Image: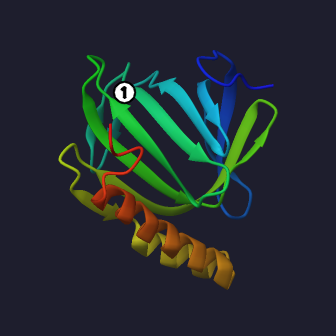
């Protein structure tokens, strides 16, 4: 059972492509669980050079917000000194939590939210290409576009988790 708050339970996060193939996987710790919201803490074990974000240093902390009933998640990247680097949002099918494994299907659309809350939407072309490649049903395409709209609304109104 996941502890409600301040827990230290480790879980695996598995990101799949629409056809079920594994895309990424990492370990994180549960820091909060409230209704459909699951908050995880993770740390980059290696440096990553991202084409749009630049260098994400080893030790960068990722506070990850997953809703088990929403088509997106939000990562708050913190520099090793604790300052906000960016928010990184993923559009995905609602995740499933099975014991100590959180799994979700990535739908390719990403959004960078800078500290001033300006945004950059990424990979719309990749979403469209994979919608054809994997024959996304209408409800998947609709869910992805609604998720993007909802994220933009949360950012514009500075609602959780963009209020921190």
Nearest the eye: 35 or 68: 35
Residue closer to the observer: 153 or 92: 153
The location of residue 76, given as percent across then percent down, is: 39, 37
Question: Residue 152 appears at what percent x and percent y?
Answer: 36, 64
Name the residue located 68 percent from the left edge and 64 percent from the top edge.
18
Residue 97's quadrant in the figure? top right
Secondary element at tag 1:
loop
Which residue sits at x=36%, y=24%?
60
Q: Is residue 133 left or right of residue 54?
A: right
Please provide percent x and percent y for residue 155. Answer: 32, 56
The 10 Å Cα crowd at callout 1, few under 14, some 14 to 19, many 20 or more, is: few
Q: Is residue 27 visible?
A: no
State how many labels appear.
Answer: 1
Instruction: Give above or below for 148 relative to 25.
Output: below
Please name whichever residue, 106 or 95, is drawn nearer the observer in this view of the structure: 95
Identify whether 109 is placed above or below 137: above
User: Above or below — where is 8 with respect to 48?
Assistant: above
85 shown above or below 131: above
Q: Residue at x 41, y 72 (%)?
A: 124
Query: Is residue 144 visible in this depiction of the protein?
Result: yes
Percent position (x, y) of residue 121? Answer: 33, 64
Q: Please tell me which residue is depicted at 63% across the width and 15% down the height of the picture.
A: 8
> Which residue is disc 1 drawn over?
47
């Amino acid at each position: 059972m996941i502890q409600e708050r301040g827990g230290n339970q480790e879980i695996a996060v598995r990101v799949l492509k629409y056809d079920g193939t594994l895309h990424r996987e990492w370990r994180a710790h549960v820091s909060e669980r409230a209704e459909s919201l699951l908050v995880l803490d993770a740390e980059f074990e290696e440096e990553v050079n991202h084409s749009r974000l630049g260098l994400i240093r080893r030790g960068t902390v990722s506070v990850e917000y997953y809703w088990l009933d929403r088509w997106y998640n939000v990562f708050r990247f913190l520099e090793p000194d604790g300052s906000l680097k960016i928010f990184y949002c993923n559009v995905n099918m609602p995740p499933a939590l099975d014991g100590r494994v959180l799994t979700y299907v990535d739908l390719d659309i990403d959004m960078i939210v800078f500290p001033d809350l300006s945004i950059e939407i990424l990979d719309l072309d990749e979403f469209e290409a994979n919608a054809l490649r994997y024959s996304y049903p209408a409800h998947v395409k609709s869910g992805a576009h609604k998720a993007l709209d909802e994220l933009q609304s949360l950012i514009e109104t500075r609602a959780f988790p963009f209020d921190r």
